[in-house]
Image (cartoon, rainbow, N blue to C red):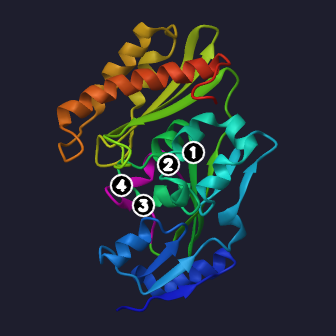
């Protein structure tokens, strides 16, 4: 049996120092719901686990005076879904966060960890992308920020450099007459991994779409921001015909694989269905309505 060191720093500087000392043999622990499994199964090698939950900046959940949301990278999902201010202001984010695992996982898993795991099917990532989320990083060279749509580089890989960690995520305030929605398809409740996930944010000017963002999960090597949908939908009426245009563009952008959860053809079909539903739900919320009780 291997022994793994454990450290619980209370400052970002201390965490960065440990990451520098141990290099690629160090792993930041947020919830650990994926990390611990990967280390236990020897998919990842680690000499030390650096627990981020004791660092104030990594645990924060705060809505600023301007309406923007700051999510600490180690804030557990149940703290997010249990925060009435976040649920009210960012229901599209809650759509995704609330379905990351069951009750036990919700108590440990974090959105920051879901992002750093960088899986193509990570539920929170398309939702973060459509919300224009920014990943705030810290490392030996200081702080920098990266748009979440550019964070993942390949399956399980991302832009984090040696000695860096994800500190927090910043989501800008939702504009007036805007709404967002995320949903996914899974083969059954016991297989809690998206076959396809789709998120959308829409801003309206009356009954016209002023701007739109669509992102997909599980249909490419990384979560996919489909910029072309927003470009095509801007200035068009918020109708089913317009949603159909967006869904067709999303289907063209998707490059899914065939695996045990579904064929590439089936996934392409789902992209169209879920994109239409995501756009429809986002518009409904922009008009003051609710989706799934939110």
Is residue 163 visible in the rendered image? The answer is no
Mark-to-mark CA distance, 2 and 1: 6 Å
Which of pointers 2 and 1 lies earlier in the amino acid sequence? Answer: 1
Q: Secondary structure at mark 1?
A: loop
How crowded pointer 1 is (Cα within 10 Å; few <14, some 14-19, many 20+) is rated as many
Q: Is residue 108 above or below residue 263?
A: below
Residue at numbered disc 4: 153
Residue at numbered disc 1: 133
How crowded pointer 4 is (Cα within 10 Å; few <14, some 14-19, many 20+) is rated as some
Which of pointers 1 and 3 lies earlier in the amino acid sequence? Answer: 3
Percent coordinates x, y for residue 287 in the rendering: 65, 16
Q: On the picture, is 196 further left or further right than 151?
A: left
Task: Report the number of numbered marks.
Answer: 4
Q: Is residue 220 above or below residue 5?
A: above
The residue mark sitting in front, 4 or 3, is: 3
Q: Secondary structure at mark 3?
A: helix
The residue mark sitting in front, 2 or 3, is: 3
Residue at numbered disc 2: 148
In reply to whether residue 158 is colored magenta, the answer given is yes
How crowded pointer 3 is (Cα within 10 Å; few <14, some 14-19, many 20+) is rated as some
Which of pointers 4 and 3 lies earlier in the amino acid sequence? Answer: 3
Disc 2 + disc 1, Cβ < 8 Å: yes
Magenta stretch, residue numbers = 146-161
Percent coordinates x, y for residue 41 in the rendering: 31, 75
Q: Between 261 and 66, which is closer to the camera in this rendering?
A: 261
Q: On the picture, is 173 further left or further right than 100?
A: right
Which of pointers 2 and 3 lies earlier in the amino acid sequence? Answer: 3
Q: Between 185 and 92, which is closer to the camera in this rendering?
A: 185
Q: Between 99 and 149, which is closer to the camera in this rendering?
A: 99
Mark-to-mark CA distance, 4 and 3: 11 Å
Disc 4 + disc 2, Cβ < 8 Å: no
């Amino acid at each position: 049996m291997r022994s793994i060191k454990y450290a619980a720093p209370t400052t970002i500087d201390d965490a960065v120092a440990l990451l520098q000392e141990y290099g690629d043999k160090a792993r930041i622990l947020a919830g650990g719901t994926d990390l611990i499994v990967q280390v236990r199964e020897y998919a990842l090698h680690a000499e030390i686990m650096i627990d981020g939950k004791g660092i104030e900046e990594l645990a924060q959940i705060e809505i600023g005076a301007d309406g923007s949301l700051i999510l600490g990278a180690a804030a557990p999902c149940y703290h997010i879904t249990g925060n009435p201010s976040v649920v009210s202001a960012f229901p599209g984010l809650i759509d995704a966060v609330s379905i990351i695992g069951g009750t036990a996982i919700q108590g440990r898993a974090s959105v920051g960890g879901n992002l750093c795991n960088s899986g193509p099917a990570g539920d929170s990532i398309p939702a973060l992308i459509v919300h224009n989320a920014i990943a705030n990083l810290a490392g030996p060279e200081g702080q920098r920020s990266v748009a979440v749509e550019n964070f993942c580089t390949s399956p399980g890989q991302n832009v984090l450099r040696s000695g860096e960690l994800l500190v927090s995520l910043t989501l800008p305030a939702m504009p007036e007459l805007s709404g967002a929605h995320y949903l996914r398809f899974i083969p059954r409740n016991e297989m809690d991994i998206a076959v396809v996930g789709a998120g959308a944010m829409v801003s309206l000017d009356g009954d016209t779409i002023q701007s739109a963002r669509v992102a997909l999960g599980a249909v490419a090597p990384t979560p996919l921001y489909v910029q072309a949908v927003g470009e095509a939908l801007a200035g068009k009426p918020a109708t089913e015909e317009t949603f159909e245009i967006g869904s067709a563009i999303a289907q063209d952008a998707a490059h899914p694989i065939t695996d045990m959860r579904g064929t590439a053809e089936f996934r392409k079909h789902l992209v169209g269905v879920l994109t239409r539903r995501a756009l429809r739900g986002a518009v409904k919320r922009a008009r003051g309505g609710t989706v799934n009780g939110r």
